[in-house]
Image (spheres, helix red, strand yellow):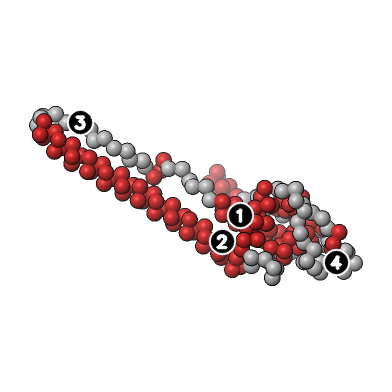
C-alpha cells in the first residue's frame, strides 16, 4: 500500500519538477530572445539613424502570471488520503457499516489482485462518482462473522458519500487546532 502511495507521490513530484523546468526554460528563452532582439535592433538603428531608438519587441511573462498546472494525480492522492484517514481512525464504540465498507474498499484497492493501474482506475471511478457497483466480493469481511458480505452492493457514488460523511463526523475538514490558536493570539 505504501509503495503504491510512494509511486503516486514520486509521479506527482516528477510532474511538478517538469513544470518548474518548463517555466525556467520559458523564462530563459524570453530573456535570451529579448536580449538578441535588442542587439539586432541596436545594429539596425545604428545603420539607419544614430539618434532614433524604439523599445525592444518581445514577449516576456512573469512566473507569477503563469497559472498552476492541473495535476490529475493530485486529486487521486487526495482521495486516497481520505480513504486512509477513515481506515486509520480509532475503533468506534458502535459498529458503523459505512466504515466497514470503506475498510473493505481499501482492502480491495490494495489486495494481491490489485496493481497501480487498477488503483488509478478505481480511484478515478470514485472521484467521478460512477453508478457502477464496486466489486468487493473477493475481499473477505472479517469484521462481522454473521454478516454475508456478498450482499454488500455499493456504487462508487454511495462509497464517496460514505467517505465524505465519515470525514465530516471526524473533523477532517476542520483546521488543525494550532492554526486556530495562532489566529486567536494574532487577533488579541
Q: Residue at x 39, y 49 (%)?
A: 23
Query: Is 42 situated left or right of 116 in this image?
Result: left
Using residue 39 as the reference point, say whether residue 8 is left or right of it. Answer: right
Res. 30 image quadrant: top left
**Residue occupying the point 56% across, 65% down:** 6
Q: Is label 1 or label 4 in front?
A: 1
Q: Do callouts 1 and 3 mark residues in contact (Cβ within 8 Å)?
A: no
Dots 2 and 3: beta carbons under 8 Å? no
User: If the image is split into quadrants, where does the N terminus sit?
Assistant: bottom right
Q: Earlier in the sequence, mark 1 or mark 4?
A: 1
For residue 8, the mark is 2
Q: Which mark is residue 144?
A: 4
* Residue linked to disc 1: 76
Number of other residues with Cα within 10 Å of mark 1, as a class: few under 14, some 14 to 19, many 20 or more: many
**Quick one: label 2, few (<14), some, or many (20+) residues within 10 Å?**
some
At 86% from the left and 59% from the top, the residue drawn is: 151
User: Residue shown at 51%/62% (left/top)?
Assistant: 10
Q: Secondary structure at mark 1?
A: helix
Q: Is residue 89 visible?
A: no
Q: Nearer the viewer, mark 4 or mark 2?
A: 2
Q: Which residue lies under the disc numbered 3? A: 54
- Distance from disc 4 to disc 3, alpha carbons, whole Å, reads 81 Å
Q: Decide: is 18 above or below 138.
A: above
Instruction: Find residue 163 and report its horizontal and vertical position in percent.
Output: 72, 53
Task: State the image coordinates of residue 140 (x, y, percent, origin top left).
Answer: 80, 68
Discs 4, 2 touching: Cβ within 8 Å: no
* Image quadrant containing the C terminus: top right
Element at label 4: loop
Farthest right residue in view: 146
Q: Earlier in the sequence, mark 2 or mark 3?
A: 2
Residue 53 picture location, percent across and down = 16, 31
Q: Is 33 left, or right, of 130 in this rendering? A: left
Amino acid at each position: 500500500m505504501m509503495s503504491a502511495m510512494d509511486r503516486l507521490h514520486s509521479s506527482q513530484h516528477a510532474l511538478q519538477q517538469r513544470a518548474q523546468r518548463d517555466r525556467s526554460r520559458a523564462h530563459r528563452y524570453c530573456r535570451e530572445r529579448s536580449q538578441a532582439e535588442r542587439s539586432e535592433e541596436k545594429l539596425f538603428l545604428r545603420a539607419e539613424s544614430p539618434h532614433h531608438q524604439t523599445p525592444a519587441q518581445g514577449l516576456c511573462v512573469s512566473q507569477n502570471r503563469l497559472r498552476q498546472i492541473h495535476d490529475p494525480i493530485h486529486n487521486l492522492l487526495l482521495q486516497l488520503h481520505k480513504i486512509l484517514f477513515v481506515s486509520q481512525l480509532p475503533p468506534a464504540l458502535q459498529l458503523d457499516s459505512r466504515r466497514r465498507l470503506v475498510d473493505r474498499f481499501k482492502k480491495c484497492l490494495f489486495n494481491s489482485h490489485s496493481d497501480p493501474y487498477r488503483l488509478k482506475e478505481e480511484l478515478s471511478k470514485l472521484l467521478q462518482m460512477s453508478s457502477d457497483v464496486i466489486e468487493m466480493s473477493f475481499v473477505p469481511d472479517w469484521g462481522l462473522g454473521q454478516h454475508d458480505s456478498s450482499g454488500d452492493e455499493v456504487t462508487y457514488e454511495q462509497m464517496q458519500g460514505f467517505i465524505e460523511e465519515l470525514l465530516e463526523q471526524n473533523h477532517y475538514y476542520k483546521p488543525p487546532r494550532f492554526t486556530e490558536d495562532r489566529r486567536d493570539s494574532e487577533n488579541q
